[in-house]
Amino acid sequence: MWFIYALLSAVFAALTSILAKVGIEGVSSNLATAIRTIVVLLMAWGMVLITNTQNGITEISKRSWLFLILSGLATGASWLCYYKALQMGEASKVVPIDKLSVVFTLILAFIFLHEPFTWKSGVGALLIAAGTLFMVL
């Protein structure tokens, strides 16, 4: 089931890029990011309320709060940079560079989460990086 959600995530991310590129025309990238964030916030809290999981908020540990807040800050920084890049460049070049996050995630997961970095991971990361360079240059 995780694969289906991951695939849907990729499809929605692709739609996000195309819709954002059209919507950002003539709009400050920071304002566009703020509007997008409000929509995401409302949608996320809507899902919490629909699934009746809001009571779990009191059970979140301090450590989880810290890392969720840090993750939110990283997400915000990513979105601000992404929208600025998308406003200034072509979506077909910005998006592949953004997807280098896969390579960075593999490296960071190995360093901080001690996840295995196999030869398959290494080859895959190199192919993603090479493919990104090929698409952008």
Image: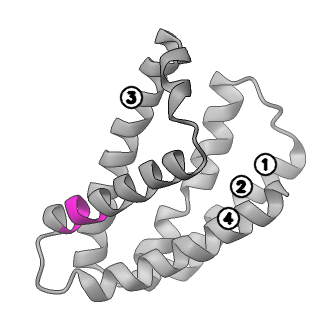
Q: Amino acid at mark 1?
A: Gly
* Quadrant the N terminus occupies: bottom right
Residue 25 placement, left or right of 118: left
Of the two numbered discs 4 and 3 in the rendering, the one whose residue sits closer to the viewer? 3
Q: Mark 1–mark 2 contact, CB under 8 Å?
A: yes
Residue 70 placement, left or right of 36: right
Q: Mark 1–mark 4 contact, CB under 8 Å?
A: no
Q: Amino acid at mark 2?
A: Ala
- Image mark for residue 69: 3
Identify the residue position indicated by label 1 in the image: 122
Q: Which residues are magenta?
A: 32-36
Above/below status of 69 relative to 98 = above
Residue at point 26%, 56% (across, down):
80
Identify the residue position indicated by label 4 in the image: 128
- Image mark for residue 125: 2
Choose top left, top right, bottom left or bottom right for residue 27.
bottom left
Q: Residues within 10 Å of mark 4 (few under 14, many from 20)?
A: some
Above/below status of 50 relative to 62 = below
Inter-mark Cα distance, 1 to 3: 30 Å
Using the image as rendered, state which of residue 103 and residue 51 is in the foreground: 51
The earlier-in-sequence mark between 2 and 3 is 3
Image x and y of residue 20, in percent: 34, 79
